[in-house]
């Protein structure tokens, strides 16, 4: 049952791309919401600290994590700006 839940989460994450992929020290891939990252440290291991106080150690370098976050933000900024429905407003602008 747990494996099914992980599989469903994996497909949801991969299909929607709401998260970035990082690698734990054991090589296992994990998906992290970049909006919840507070700080990334190199001590010499890379430690990702989240806004809720949790932290994880990953194999990825801080530069690689930052690059992934920037790519994530660029993707969603461009999706928002160039979305086909942005020319249609669902509300009336004040006059």
Image (cartoon, grey):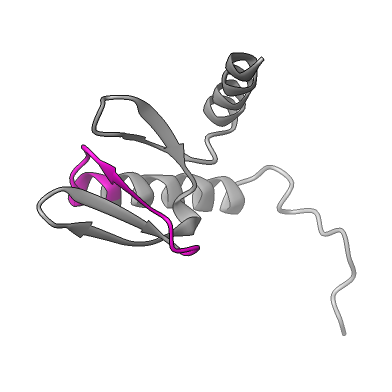
x 47%, y 64%: residue? 51
On the image, the x and y values in percent for residue 19 come to 49, 40
Check the picture and name the quadrant holding the C terminus.
bottom right
The span picked out in magenta is 51-65
**Furthest-front residue in this view:** 1
x 43%, y 45%: residue? 72
Splitting the image into 4 quarters, where does residue 7 fall? top right
**Furthest-bottom residue in this view:** 95
Horizontal side of residue 72 vs 85, given as left or right: left
x 28%, y 47%: residue? 65
| Image: 52 above or below 80 | below
Horizontal side of residue 70 vs 18, given as left or right: left
16 and 30: which one is in front? Answer: 30
On the image, the x and y values in percent for residue 64 come to 22, 44
56 and 34: which one is in front? Answer: 56
Q: Is residue 7 covered in magenta?
A: no
């Amino acid at each position: 049952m747990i494996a099914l839940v992980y599989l469903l989460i994996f497909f949801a994450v991969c299909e929607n791309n709401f998260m970035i992929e990082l690698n734990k020290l054991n090589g296992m891939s994990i998906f992290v919401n970049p909006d919840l990252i507070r700080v990334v440290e190199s001590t010499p291991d890379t430690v990702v600290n989240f806004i809720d106080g949790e932290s994880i150690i990953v194999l990825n370098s801080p530069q690689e994590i930052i690059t992934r976050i920037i790519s994530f933000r660029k993707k969603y900024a461009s999706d928002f700006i160039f979305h086909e429905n942005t020319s249609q407003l669902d509300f009336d602008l004040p006059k």
